[in-house]
Amino acid sequence: MPIPSTLLEFARKLRKEQTDAEQFLWRILRNRNFCGLKFRRQCPIGAYILDFFCDDLNLAIELDGGGHATVDQTAYDEERTKIINGAGIRVIRFWNHDVFNETEAVLEEIYRQTMKDE
């Protein structure tokens, strides 16, 4: 099913306006730098845009800032994750501050998730 043009335009906008944490992690993931895996950023899937997505593993990486700590946003994120999981995509989430302050632990968890399919 084709992706609506409005969603594609929004994904392009998000790529140009990445958060600092997204820029930082993208430098690590891009060009198959991480475990030889191809990741895409701000990738439209269904009605959602995933921060990072690896097609080969059906693995999404989502980075959350402080706005995701509210009760309403947490409930929305949980529902969104259920829908994405239902499409056969695993979702792992990290807080933006952990990407900077606990980089090694974040990368270890991403690595562990990539090994689940082997």
Image (cartoon, rainbow, N blue to C red):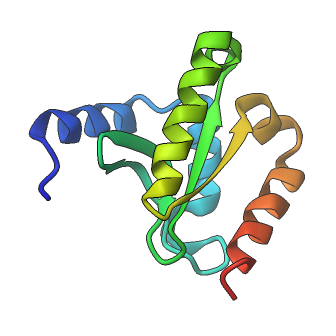
Residue 81's image quarter? Answer: top right
Most foreground residue, 99 or 44: 44
Position of 87 relative to 82 (above/below): below
Estimate the x, y position of residue 53 in percent, counting from the top left. Answer: 48, 58
Residue 57 or 86: which is nearer the viewer? 86
Residue 52 shows up from this direction: no
Please indicate whether residue 114 sits to the left or right of residue 55 in the image: right
The reply to whether residue 87 is visible in this rendering is: yes
How many numbered marks appear?
0
Q: Residue at x 80, y 70 (%)?
A: 112
Give the image location of residue 68, x and y in percent: 64, 20
Q: Which residue corresponds to the image point at 47% horizontal and 33% vertical from the top-left?
A: 18
Q: Is residue 42 left or right of residue 28?
A: left
Front residue of this view, candidates 77 and 40: 77
Q: Quadrant of the C terminus?
A: bottom right
Image height of 100 relative to 25, above or below = above
Residue 96: horizontal and vertical position, in percent? 71, 31
Q: Is residue 40 above or below residue 37?
A: above
Which residue sits at x=74%, y=79%?
115
Residue at 27% from the left image edge and 39% from the top image edge: 12
Report x, y in % for residue 19.
55, 29
Name the quarter where the N terminus is drawn: bottom left
Name the quadrant containing residue 90: bottom right
Between 18 and 108, the residue placed more toward the observer is: 108
